[in-house]
Image (spheres, coloured by chain):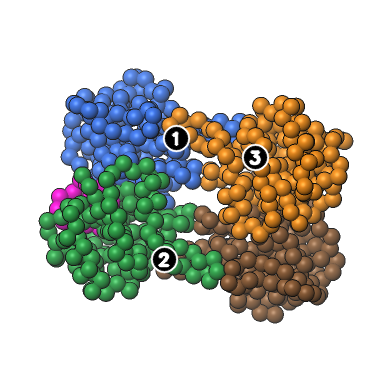
Chain colours: A green, B blue, C brown, D orange
Amino acid sequence: MKIRVLATGGTFDKEYNEVTGALYFKDTHVREMLRLARCGLDVEIRTLMMIDSTEMTDLDRELLAKSCAESGEDRIVISHGTDTMAETARFLGERIRDKTIVLTGAVVPYTFGSSDGLFNLGSALAFAQALPSGVYVAMNGRCFDWDNVRKNRSTARFEEAGGK
Amino acid sequence: MKIRVLATGGTFDKEYNEVTGALYFKDTHVREMLRLARCGLDVEIRTLMMIDSTEMTDLDRELLAKSCAESGEDRIVISHGTDTMAETARFLGERIRDKTIVLTGAVVPYTFGSSDGLFNLGSALAFAQALPSGVYVAMNGRCFDWDNVRKNRSTARFEEAGGK
Amino acid sequence: MKIRVLATGGTFDKEYNEVTGALYFKDTHVREMLRLARCGLDVEIRTLMMIDSTEMTDLDRELLAKSCAESGEDRIVISHGTDTMAETARFLGERIRDKTIVLTGAVVPYTFGSSDGLFNLGSALAFAQALPSGVYVAMNGRCFDWDNVRKNRSTARFEEAGGK
Amino acid sequence: MKIRVLATGGTFDKEYNEVTGALYFKDTHVREMLRLARCGLDVEIRTLMMIDSTEMTDLDRELLAKSCAESGEDRIVISHGTDTMAETARFLGERIRDKTIVLTGAVVPYTFGSSDGLFNLGSALAFAQALPSGVYVAMNGRCFDWDNVRKNRSTARFEEAGGK
């Protein structure tokens, strides 16, 4: 079973620029994380964009939906910023029905000691293998349907949106 | 959905003793790992034993099977040393049919920088939620059935045993 | 020999806020770092302020100079942001002559995996013990006199200012 | 000022073998540590041996003394296992008087998250620059003369031997 990973940026992939002191994007850490994980899955990684999810437009989401639709693989994991992850999940959920698509991310960059990124990537890849077609958000060890998920802005945790 | 985690030790939970220079067990790191993961699942952690899996006897496995059978939760993750993980999976698989039990571990201790433990725990918890009743091994991002898995001793990777 | 550590903030002590995604100050990590270092020195830690060094005013520097002058210890290490570390060194160097004062910091926060902070703290404490009275900057493994040091803005490395 | 680093192994440089579960030596981490430290010193690194210090013989110490004596640099840092660090310091102290030689090491391998190695390397390089000719042990943030140091076996901390 081959899995496609589409990297879009988000906290997950942020680096610390030691000259400016700002957080920035270089490239996705997914490859390095899978090596650390001794991952034995057949994974195809593509970087679609490297942006903050607050900057993601519907044009970007169209590109993402197109990439999912045209992917040769039926199991797809998308690394995504947490701020608009639920919006992108909805966008994809309304358009793609015949693939298993799992969005995940992190609230702390992978390059920080205390990141949740490796755990989330592990759980997203597992859900992508085990779940039927549909669009999901894998965060905090849980899996949410695309039409019933939101990020709680005050706790940075994901939860049911409370009614489909 | 509540999940039970049964800790048995293994590389996963090894510490480095700075006085003797030996690796040893103190207590499971699962709680700390779930905090780092910002895990939002309802998880009940029990430490059954803290041993190397090479030292695990069938008596220990009986205890483990009993703990699974008597657990109030139907979804169970077992942290286990990798050396005899496949044997324990078989032992449980032949005895328990009505629960989803996922064994996982690590080839490098969690307290080392380069551990696969956090990734494996994330994937094990996901498989435990998503898969039907049965006993599984979650390692290297993959999920193996209890009756078709072995550890490759020369690569420290898990693979199909090659015929059920 | 007792050493006083005065914490003022800087990159060294920055944390990542997982709710807002911004870097911020909580408290100094010096205590935790000394524990990790298995430090056997008699160290007295005081947090004077927790600020970016770009925000440090001469009033703050007066407070710092006063704290150095009134300290019961003759050996002092100051954790400081790198951006104005050279300015503060000059400010102190012109005012205090009878103590050994070593400023240090980091270009990457301690809580990131790739921080230079632990190395710098080790070298600053060593220079503070071994050098005669004077004000110094300890960065990049080197030790600079207060009247001959600057941060190279394009490389984030410290160097001689090129003429006293 | 150029500094020579002589690597001999010790806990400092131990790796975890994920296939066998044993600790072993590959090569010294000093180069990688200096890169992480953004070290700006002119450092020449030589690996003399990669052994546990409990296995170090007087023949090894002769080789080490010869390497120190013949080194073009007058400032030398030696990475060394902690178990016989004091013995090697004495061996060198009785033979070499015209160079500044600082031995250091770690009680936890550098590749573990909780290592004291980076701190110790920072302090050893600083002492090597700042101290007059002599042989020293730099551990726990402190600096000991070669004829007045021992490792406390029960705490894994270094202390004065209690009388020269």
Left-right relation of B153 to D123? left
Chain to which the residue tagged by mark 3 belongs: D
Dot 1: what SS? loop
Q: Are marks 2 and 1 in contact (CB under 8 Å)?
A: no
Give the answer, above or below, for where C122 lies relative to D24.
below
Determine which of the numbered discs, if any, sits on residue D47 in the image. Answer: 3
Q: CA distance from mark 3 to mark 1?
A: 24 Å
Question: Which amino acid does the dot numbered 2 rest on?
Answer: Phe
Residue A132 placement (x, y as % from top left): 15, 50
Question: Which amino acid does the dot numbered 1 rest on?
Answer: Glu
Q: Is residue A99 visible?
A: yes
Left-right relation of B104 to D111? left
Give the answer, above or below, for where B102 lies relative to C161.
above
- Labels 3 and 2 positioned on one and the same chain: no
Q: Residue at x 39, y 29 (%)?
A: B154
Q: Residue furthest left?
A: A98
Q: CA distance from mark 3 to mark 2?
A: 37 Å
Q: Is residue B4 visible?
A: no
**Which quarter of the figure has residue B148?**
top left
Q: Quadrant of the C terminus of chain C?
A: bottom right
- How many marks can you see? 3
Which residue is more in the foreground, A105 or C141? C141
